[in-house]
Image (spheres, grey):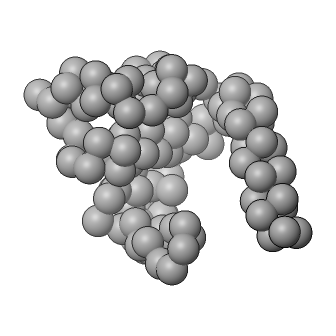
Amino acid sequence: LDPEVTSTSHVLVTSGSRVRLGGIGVVDVLEYEQMKTLPDQQREDLVALGHTLLSVACRTHVTPQNLQQCTMKLLQHYSQDLHNILLSLITKPPNIFELCAAIAPKAFDELDMMYGVADA
């Protein structure tokens, strides 16, 4: 998930609630000689993911000028947990293990609900 690739212009929404990311890995191949360390790449990926998710949630491209407005809109329409996670991704990204621990309860609740609907 390169920051140049992880943007709203590469998010494809298909039928139902399925989301696909297009163009993953292209920049990594083109910039192979300039490879950064893995922790640096992961940090950039998480920041880019935070910006992309915030842009999708606010339905606008997030810039430094409208970041405050977008976070306020996020608070109005979504949970405090999502607000906190996205804000931490953008400002001080956690490592991938901390992120997984933060979203695990909600992810399992969502899976449980999906299986309940599928079983009905």
Looking at this rendering, what residue extends furthest in the front direction? 120
Q: Nearer the viewer, residue 104 or 100?
A: 104
Q: Position of residue 58 (x, y in %)?
A: 29, 42
Q: Residue at x 54, y 74 (%)?
A: 16
Measured along the vertical axis of the image, is residue 16 above or below residue 46?
below
Residue 25 on image: x %, y %: 51, 69
Residue 112 % position (x, y): 83, 51
Placement of 78 over or under 25, stated as above or below: above
Residue occupying image coordinates x 23% and y 40%: 62
Residue 25 visible in the current orientation? no
Which quarter of the figure is the C terminus placed in? bottom right
Q: Position of residue 66 (x, y in %)?
A: 15, 30
Name the residue at the left extreme.
65
Indicate whether 88 appears above or below 114: above
Task: Tell me where residue 102 sits by quadrant.
Answer: top right
Residue situated in front as seen by the camera: 20 or 120 = 120
Q: Is residue 113 visible?
A: yes
